[in-house]
Amino acid sequence: MLQHAVWQLRGSSITLDQPIVMGILNVTPDSFSDGGKQATIGAAVRAGVTMVRDGAALVDVGGESTRPGAAPIPVAEELARVIPVVERLVGEGVVVSIDTSKPEVARRGIKAGAAVINDVTGLAAPEMRDICAQAGVGVVIMHMQGTPETMQADPEYHDVVAEICSYLSERATTARDAGIGRDSIVVDPGIGFGKTLAHNIEILRHLDAFTPLGYPVLVGTSRKGFLGAILEPIRGATRPDERDGATVATVALSVASGVQIVRVHNVPLAVEVAYTANAMVPAEHDKEIDRT
């Protein structure tokens, strides 16, 4: 585990001397994982508060599905879904991240109290970078090939790990040039976002390639389709909520590879697995992040 790293957020910080769990809160009627169980404000707030009680360090609120094939929704619709939930969660003392690629949603979410912007486009929009820099929020820079509508059509790479590392390094540098603090940046290789089963497995086998970038690493594998493909020979077709065992296998692997943040649906299970795996991490992972 990379020690002494601090993720600087808006108005607070999170020490990453232990792996932390980010809870996933989809406030969408078409969530791939739960089919919209948290689509009402009250249900979403109760679920988010429960995640924190179960050990999540922060909750990632998403109002637009980014599952393969998903079409974008209007800004007004996304705002109507997420802003009331963010306001109420912040009022409950929850550290909130917003999963969005829309600058206006980020701006309004920050005004409502969000401390982190998690952008699947890697802060591609200059306006998004400016908003995040001015607000001093934490950011998650993720890799995605294509868009949610097209990303699984036919993803190709010459060297998937090397190409993602290069992309994340370049995007992080662009973010810093825009005024986002280095200690505010987390990088995410984007498991399942424009990757085949073979690509996802290759990334997971080489997660230690991302820590030398000098930023904390987030991994999000929770309940994704590639886990269903892995399980199919022994379980047949599985629903997303039947993949929590496979998910936490990747959580343990991630922690053992030096990953600091895991993003999951089943928070209590992931907290236990991450804590246990971290207790067994070899001493060679106990190094400070290179800040040069």
Image: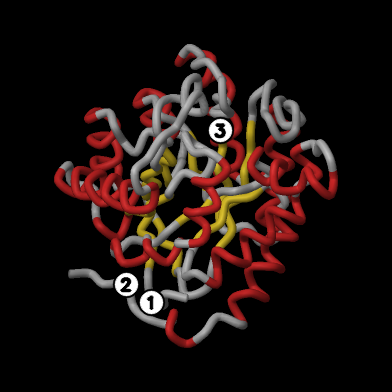
The residue singled out by tag 2 in the image is: 289
Q: Are marks 2 and 1 in contact (CB under 8 Å)?
A: yes
Which comes sooner in the sequence, label 3 or label 2?
A: 3
Q: Measure the alpha-carbon separation of dots 3 and 1.
A: 29 Å
Amino acid on which the number 3 mark rests in the picture:
Gly
Mark 3 or 2, closer to the camera: 2
In-front residue for pair 27/270: 270
Q: Nearer the viewer, mark 2 or mark 1?
A: 2
Decide which of 3, 213 is in the foreground and name it: 213
- Judging from the image, what secondary structure is the residue with disc 2 in? loop
Residue at (44% x, 32% y) in the render: 155
Residue 142 percent location from the top left of the image = 40, 43
| Mark before the other along the chain sequence, 2 or 1 | 1
Question: What's the residue at 49%, 43% (across, down)?
Answer: 97
Q: Which residue is mark 3?
A: 62
Q: 10 Å neighbourhood of mark 2: few (<14), some, or many (≥20)?
A: some
| Residue 71, horizontal then vertical, whole percent | 53, 15
Q: Quadrant location of the C terminus? A: bottom left
Q: How many marks?
A: 3
110 to the left or right of 152 = left
Query: For the point 68% across and 46% down, which residue is it?
Result: 227
Q: Quadrant of residue 27?
A: top right
Is 66 located above or below residue 215 in the figure? above
Mark 1: which amino acid?
His
Label 1 sits on residue = 4
* Image x and y of residue 262, in percent: 56, 56
